[in-house]
Image (cartoon, coloured by chain):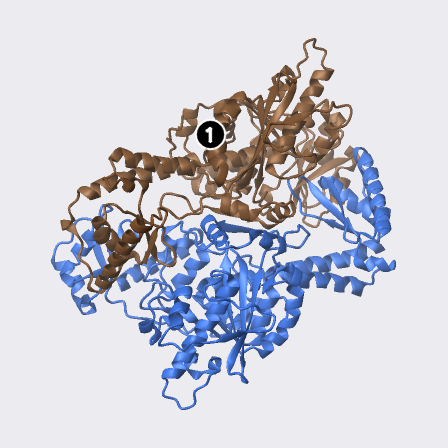
Chain colours: A brown, B blue
Amino acid sequence: MDVTKSNFQTVLEALDDELENASFVSIDTEFTGLNSTEGRSNKLSSLDTPSERYKKVLNSSPQFIIIQFGLSIFRFDNSISKYVNKTYNFYIFPNTSTLPGLPDTKFLSQASSLGFLASQGFDFNKLIKEGIPYLNLVNEEKLRVILEKKSQSLHLHSDASSSQLSEIPADQKRFLNNITSRVETFLQNEENEEKRNAVLELHCNTIQNELIFSHVKSRYPNLLFESSKKTCNGCTVIVKKTGIQKSKTEPSETDSYVAEMQKVEDNVGFSRIIRKITDSGKLVVGHNMLLDLCHILGQFCAPLPEDYDDFKGMVNTFFPRFIDTKVMATTKPFRDLLQNSALDRLLNSLLAAPFRNIEVIPATGFPSYTDNFKNHEAGYDAFITGRCFVAMANYLEDISSSQSKTAAVHESLLVTPFYQKIFMMMVPDIPYMTISGPDLEPSREHVFHVTFPSEWKLQDIFHLFSVHGTVRVDWTGDTSAFVTLHRKENSHFVLSAMAESKLPVGCSVISYQAYLNRKSQIATLSAEVPDLSSRKRLSSPVQCNTSDVPSPKKTREDVKNMKLNKEQFVVSANWD
Amino acid sequence: MDVTKSNFQTVLEALDDELENASFVSIDTEFTGLNSTEGRSNKLSSLDTPSERYKKVLNSSPQFIIIQFGLSIFRFDNSISKYVNKTYNFYIFPNTSTLPGLPDTKFLSQASSLGFLASQGFDFNKLIKEGIPYLNLVNEEKLRVILEKKSQSLHLHSDASSSQLSEIPADQKRFLNNITSRVETFLQNEENEEKRNAVLELHCNTIQNELIFSHVKSRYPNLLFESSKKTCNGCTVIVKKTGIQKSKTEPSETDSYVAEMQKVEDNVGFSRIIRKITDSGKLVVGHNMLLDLCHILGQFCAPLPEDYDDFKGMVNTFFPRFIDTKVMATTKPFRDLLQNSALDRLLNSLLAAPFRNIEVIPATGFPSYTDNFKNHEAGYDAFITGRCFVAMANYLEDISSSQSKTAAVHESLLVTPFYQKIFMMMVPDIPYMTISGPDLEPSREHVFHVTFPSEWKLQDIFHLFSVHGTVRVDWTGDTSAFVTLHRKENSHFVLSAMAESKLPVGCSVISYQAYLNRKSQIATLSAEVPDLSSRKRLSSPVQCNTSDVPSPKKTREDVKNMKLNKEQFVVSANWD
């Protein structure tokens, strides 16, 4: 079911019950772009540590936004021993009005990503006209503060006498007379025609803006005067009637406060869905979730922290129980049974033997997604992610030697080892981030860091290591690369052999550990010159020491009071 | 007439004749966003100098893009003594493919701007699916170089023996066999079914990518192997047949070169329209053109220069004769006759007395734009800009005392004073940038720079200057503002009066000139610490000294060889 502004409130109100009854939910998102490929330091490497990978994501994708969110709710029906499904496909777009307190979001798009989505039938007109707005905690708090101030000043102003009015410059008197007459006409028309949403826009320059507030506003206590954002064209003052004024009595402080706080709730919009998912405590299933989680947290919860361990804490707070089906699909036994773990191909494989065919019943009023239909629509992808999870969990039950097998596989103990792990693309020896504890720390004694002249090609590196067998090369620049021996047993001979034979001019080979130490030294030096370190963030040092156990779960209070990197804004919103 | 990918080639081919016969053209553009309001230093001020204003535009809007371009061609038909019109409305979107050499453009959008366009009926689906691509000179040159290299290496590779093949790692042999078999199948299917546009995508990691090129490609001289951009998902090698291979003979070097260069032309796309407009030498009319010109130049010509005088040179090169109707509308005699110079309101005023009704005839096959129809569609706005120009030029002819009046008003000598002037919003004493020579340098002796405690309000500043009459206040921060006296004759008393009376604590008043000198000193100090100056660019000093006459027109060669600020890429493309 597509969800836009028009049916959002209905869906939102039904969601508490839906989630209460859910067995698990699966999610997927679509973004306006994937990666900023500029800057070599942000390129993914097969030797990235989890902390490095997180920093690369942080540096390359925060300006892209989620424009579609799929939420697929699976409920195990004991009477038929099958999962019943409701899938929602939310269109999400930042607030497009320019009212004070609301961010006028500027976001990045990647032409290829939008082109791809358009080719898959994504409706961008629907997105921009009907997309549901959102606010993260920081922007919600800003709006709340502004509206509270406004609500207070409304009452202060009505108390103040008009004796302290500023002098009207001679050349502005005609302007003010004109404005007053337009406001009178607006007030008259408004009452006659009952156009309750009508607004009057007064375009003016900065000084005229001040004059409207000091000389015109005070005469019309039943009208709301709002100063819109300043643009190239000067300022705009928006005049309107509020619903409260309909009663022809002065709004009480409480009424006006309630109205303003409702405005906050309305603009928090889609973020409330995420808060409900968190509050439900239900298992959340996704596929290849790193970008999804980063974008969901940053866009709907709070700016992402710089520190990887803080990120783990934040994930544990908002997604206390999740499974990444790509981690499952690339782990034994599935790794040996599946050719490809890309979502659409994964589903195809799971529909054939040795996997059992899984029937998922669409709930009443929800259309059935035919297989291979609507690939890359967030709702559809969320749905098939859930199906893949059920299929793989079923298989684990099927092959287990346990006596008590369950069809309600979301409760299976066999899936618990996959909790709180995020797939890490392209890193064979650390295939996932461990969010609930310390990350894997594989030995990299068979990895060497090589520097060489810029004219070197792959062949030259193969040649340099030829006596040690075949190698994998991961370029880190035009004149450097990591070299990984296929035959680990040769690791101990490399450096001594290199020392004996004469290395070519301009070439050096050091161990992975020596490379880490060198980077760490540079990082320490940079940290001593704070300014340098902030500008060098993109090439931050390799942090391989993951032995510090991260706080596995931050309390919600921790996150609220966390000093956030983007805006240094202390979040203290209360949304419990 | 809407122009998209599907009819672009036809329109392009007809355009030389259209422009040859044109009397003048008018243009308009729609952007994905208007301004980055972050950063106080980028806010427009009524005391901006032209150079400061240019820098503010440069700092705040380069990441937004033009997505619609209106070109309205007016031809004066002597037989009916009326203008005949053809209006084109181009949808423009960056290349969405990920082929090597083509930029995968990342661009910024402002939610409010897209929301506004959507509310006006802008079709974003059409834009993304059918928008015409473009390349500026820098990107065109990059593509040309890459395709030339490819064209050369194609022949080098076919000469090279396969004796120097790199060793195939044991664990990759199965992968390579699999790839070879898929390529064989592709080749077979392709020939049977004549699907000429079919491509085969081979997903792989970095080392497999190298292996495909070294071991598979050489066996299939009739297939094109292209390495697509690397993504999170690894690499993709795209395999396809070229048209040339249909003949079953080896393509000659010349044939292949021609095909590659045609690919460049196709991708230069919309930029060729701008080049044709430049080459036509025809008068170009726009309305409030600063953002239009900056975006057109940056997006379709070459990155904008840092230096304002270089910008003037660039405008003169690509738009050697233009008129900004907003400059006309805000200059006498129109200033006194028109209430508002916003385009839609301007048209309304010009349709009534004392202006003569102008009939513009749509050319055969071109629909007539009804008045007030499609506001904010670039084509419509370009058309009414042209109409406004004709109406105002007609009026100048009507009121002139000259004997020889002309109806072909684009030739009127009375409009020549408006050539090469760009409207400057909100600056009363410098209402336009003079692109063809030195800018206006009005006296600002009646302007003062005031600093004060942060708790000060407008009233406090009014009070400070109360003995000198009314003033205009332009805030430059929370604790500083420019104060402009309405009564200029009081200018000389301000500083001495302030010196005699005791200024409030934390308050200082200096002349505008002293303020400029102070900023200039800071700039000099910053320049001596290059690192500091580069980071402080947003708050660059006021440059009021416009007495250096800018080179009024750079040759096209100058622009080509200009060191461009964005990428430090020397442009040397040859597109004459």
Q: Is residue B576 visible?
A: no
Q: Is residue B311 left or right of A334 when viewed as pictured?
A: left
Which of the pair B20/A549 is nearer the observer?
A: B20
SS label for mark 1: helix
Query: Residue B488's x, y, as percent?
Result: 21, 68
User: In the image, what residue occupies the spot 67% across and 64% down?
Assistant: B265
Is A327 above or below relative to B439?
above
Query: Residue A262's x, y, as percent?
Result: 37, 35
Residue at the bottom extreme of this rendering: B403
Residue at the left extreme of this rendering: B501
Is B230 above or below relative to A545?
below
Residue at the front extreme of this rendering: A192
Query: Residue B110's x, y, as percent?
Result: 47, 50
Is B297 above or below relative to B41?
below
Query: Residue A436's x, y, as percent?
Result: 55, 22
Which of the pair A226/A428 is nearer the observer?
A: A226
Q: Is residue A143 visible?
A: yes
- Residue bearing the label numbered 1: A13
User: In the image, what residue occupies the spot 47% across and 74% down?
Assistant: B552
Is A335 above or below relative to B147?
above
Q: Is residue A101 left or right of B511 when viewed as pictured?
A: right
User: In the image, what residue occupies the spot 35% across and 74% down?
Assistant: B334
User: In the image, what residue occupies the spot 36% across and 64% down?
Assistant: B49
Report the amino acid beneath label 1: Glu
Q: Is residue B362 left or right of A139 when viewed as pictured?
A: right
Binning the other alpha carbons within 10 Å of mark 1 as few (below 14), some (14 to 19) or many (20 upward) gives few
Q: Chain of mark 1?
A: A
Quarter-of-image position of residue B498: bottom left
